[in-house]
Amino acid sequence: MEPTTTSDPAPAHTGDQSREQWSSKIGFVLAAAGSAIGLGNIWRFPYVTGENGGAAFVIVYLACIALICLPYLLAELALGRHSQKNPVGAIRAVAGRTPWVIVGGLGILTGLFILSYYGVIAGWTFGYIFKNVASPDTTFTEFIATPWLVLPLFVLFLGFTAAIVQGGVEDGIERAAKVLMPILLVLMLLVIVRGVTLEGASAGLSFYLNPDFSKIGSEAIVAALGQAFFSLSLGMGAMVTYGSYLPEEENLLSAGGWVALFDTSIALLAGLMIFPAVFALDADPQAGPTLVFDVLPGLFQQMPLGTVVGMLFFLLLSVAALTSTVSLMEVVVSYCMDEQQWSRSKSVAVVTGAAFVFGFPAALSQGISPALGDMSWLVGEGGVLGATDFLGIMDKIWGDISLALGALLLCVFVGWVWSTADAAMEIRSGEGAFAPGTARLWGAFVRYVCPLVILVVVLNAFDLFSYFGLFD
Ligand code: PFF
């Protein structure tokens, strides 16, 4: 969501004086939470948790959020507000023309690639609003293997996104999201109550809440970290861009804290909604990306007014996905406008076209084209971190690895090139406390803890330690 222009914008540090700003802190928190809360929470979190063993994975995930993502989120927000620029411009504003600018470029590319396959899944979500009425007997596997359904739905969803980003200031979606997101929360609570009271649900609760750490290996840890970055929209500069619209008097610490809290709560609730039902309905928790789409309709059928509840649920999920695709597209568009001096319309048209080109094979990879559905011919039997279909491979490369890598490099940039002292000053410039002790602790996390942990996790995921004969 774009911010609204205030009549009296706070002075920019390095940007122009007329830069748009959020009308209020609530406006920022809602827009940033809108970016963060999406398919990542409700579709991706449950299936990644299911694939990686349940409760133990959730604990690793929560540790990643608290110890790595929260300090890193503050670094992105501080960089954005200080420079008042998109990720590439922000790095240039702080460090001049150095190779570090490439890190911003990587973020822009990542945004484009995530948008491409995320749009495909968002299209399925949109289609599911009507599917159970129009064709209740079609299974999910059949649905996503029907080209005349998935391709138009994907195009339609990209079109919605483009229309909103083209509009610039969108009071409409911001206001809609303010109303619709709380409704989504209430609906989730209702569905949870039904799910946990189903016969056989307790096995699901135990899978989700009783940790078994023997299930945690290096792939699970990289998946937890990747999921945490993905869910909070971190590692590609989205929060640099959104932070760049924040007025100077706002407290970055509490703004960031609220966003992380909302996002994590919704993800945890999504797990609570899915797993009891998975076990009660005899589904496979390791089903992967199809999990939520397979299980939820079965759960709705067990509810009074199930058809209406199902339609409403997928409608609200589509809106949550839309506020996320808007932020993905906005990052790339703001780069095209600021750095390439393109008009907004040209930027939106080019980015939409590019997202379509890369999303097209992703849409075909789920049962339409065998060559795209199983790409072991290209990536080997093991795939990329286990994925062999085009959509899955894109998700591992851009949704997990690239976000972690981007976050690693941006952390090193803020910690060592820009300096945490200046960044801490930026965080402190808002109202509220960022006590010197907290600031020092934060600095130590951004300089040492976050980069080291991310580095070890990513190297480990690719087995590079054993390659060099370490930790065998
Ligand atoms: N955070 C979004 C979700 O959980 O669905 C996905 C996302 C949006 C990732 C924006 C990255 C981003 F910049």
Image (tube, grey):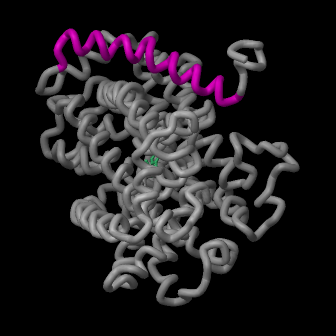
Seen in the picture, residue 275 relative to 387 is either above or below; the reply is below
How many numbered callouts? Answer: 0
In this view of the protein, which residue sits in the foreground, 310 or 2?
310
Q: Is residue 449 magenta?
A: yes
Residue range in magenta is 434-462
Residue at 70% in and 29% down? 462
Q: Residue furthest right?
A: 377
Vertical side of 9 occupied by 165: above or below:
below
Along the horizontal axis of the image, is 367 left or right of 222?
A: right
* Quarter of the view holding residue 102: top right
Q: As displayed, is residue 442 above or below residue 263?
A: above
- Residue in the picture at 25% in, 35% down: 257
Residue 7, quarter of picture: top left
Question: Residue 439: x, y in percent?
Answer: 25, 14
Q: Is residue 231 left or right of residue 359?
A: left
Say which quadrant the C terminus sits in: top right
Residue 156 in the image: x percent, y percent? Answer: 52, 72
Please, which residue is most extreme toward the bottom here?
134
Residue 206 part of the magenta segment: no
Compared to residue 200, the image places residue 331 above or below, namely: above
The answer to whether residue 338 of the structure is visible from this angle is no
Instruction: Tell me the quarter of the picture where residue 363 sits.
Output: bottom right
Identify the residue shown where x is 13% and y is 40%: 8
Q: Is residue 330 left or right of residue 154?
A: left
Please provide percent x and percent y for residue 304.
32, 84
Which residue is depicted at the point 54% across and 31% down?
404
